[in-house]
């Protein structure tokens, strides 16, 4: 039902942006929970997202609103490209910030940033085009310390990550990404900073994970056109060819 309604809204958004081509909506850098809870949880109630800009099209904004409704007890935090760089310079001076600055593609930067920010603060990371399929508080519960998602093939993905801070699993991913950038021998975002790293350094059977459809999915409310309408370079898989 969620996917059906989301896709119908997405079709309607083509008409909206045809009439109002320059209209954009602003994602907040920070938004308080819609419902506050005093029950302690192992994973902090913070939902993290990032994008190259905070000025987004209607489908991306509807996706954001839906996630807020599905995670009413979570604080929302958003960072642009510049804010990501500032965060890493502040919390990871030295080798990591130097390696991060070598990444030329925004998606690769976002890959590295998501594990770095969760390692400091904890919480839940969700891609800008992904939406929850089950209430987040109910999915995580109070005692779960981490949660990863599996694809249809059974591999781990990184467009949803839930973790408490100072995680040994995220530490292993961070060290592997850092080493990949230092070595500079791999070709492609997927293997340098993306899901390829998770599948190489984490034991799929040993981590807490669920099939993606029970946590979140991508591309129902929005698509590549609406997400990159203001970015001539296009999606990361186009950028890396150049």
Image: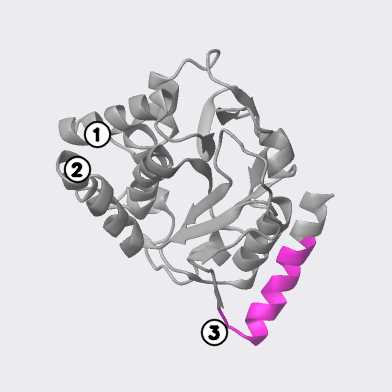
Q: Residue at x 60, y 30 (%)?
A: 151
Q: Which residue is mark 2?
A: 99
Q: Secondary structure at mark 3?
A: loop
Q: For mark 1, what is the residue?
A: 178
Q: Is residue 37 magenta?
A: no
Q: Are marks 1 and 2 in contact (CB under 8 Å)?
A: yes
Q: Residue 22, which numbered label?
A: 3
Gap in angstroms between the C-alphas marked 1 and 2: 7 Å
Tell me the CA gap for discs 3 and 1. 39 Å
Mark 1 or 2, nearer chain start: 2
Pick out the residue farthest to the front. Answer: 38
Q: Of marks 3 and 2, which one's residue comes earlier in the chain? A: 3
Badge 2 marks a residue whose secondary structure is: helix
Q: Is residue 196 left or right of residue 182?
A: right
Q: Residues within 10 Å of mark 2 (few under 14, many from 20)?
A: some
Q: Main secondary structure of the magenta part?
A: helix
The reply to whether callout 3 and callout 1 are in contact (CB within 8 Å) is no
Q: Nearer the viewer, residue 193 or 209?
A: 209
Q: Tell me the residue at 75%/58% (across/down).
A: 7
Give the quarter of the image for residue 23. Answer: bottom right
Farthest residue, direction right: 1
């Amino acid at each position: 039902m969620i996917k059906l309604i989301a896709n119908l809204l997405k079709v309607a958004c083509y008409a909206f942006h045809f009439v109002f081509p320059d209209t954009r909506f602003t994602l907040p850098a920070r938004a308080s929970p819609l419902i506050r809870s005093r029950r302690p949880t192992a994973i902090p109630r913070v939902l993290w997202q990032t994008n190259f800009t905070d000025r987004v099209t209607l489908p991306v904004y509807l996706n954001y609103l839906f996630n807020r409704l599905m995670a009413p007890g979570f604080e929302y935090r958003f960072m642009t490209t510049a804010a990501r760089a500032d965060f890493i310079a502040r919390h990871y001076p030295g080798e990591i910030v130097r390696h991060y600055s070598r990444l030329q593609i925004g998606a690769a930067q976002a890959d590295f940033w998501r594990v770095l920010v969760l390692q400091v603060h904890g919480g839940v990371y969700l891609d800008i085009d992904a939406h929850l399929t089950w209430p987040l508080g109910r999915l995580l519960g109070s005692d779960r310390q981490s949660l990863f998602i599996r694809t249809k093939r059974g591999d781990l993905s990184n467009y949803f990550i839930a973790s408490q801070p100072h995680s040994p699993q995220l530490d292993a991913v961070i060290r592997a990404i850092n080493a990949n950038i230092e070595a500079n021998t791999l070709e492609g975002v997927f293997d340098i900073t993306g899901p390829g790293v998770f599948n190489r350094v984490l034991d799929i059977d040993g981590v807490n994970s669920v099939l993606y459809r029970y946590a979140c999915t991508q591309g129902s409310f929005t698509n590549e056109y609406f997400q990159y309408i203001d970015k001539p370079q296009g999606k990361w898989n186009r950028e890396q060819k150049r």
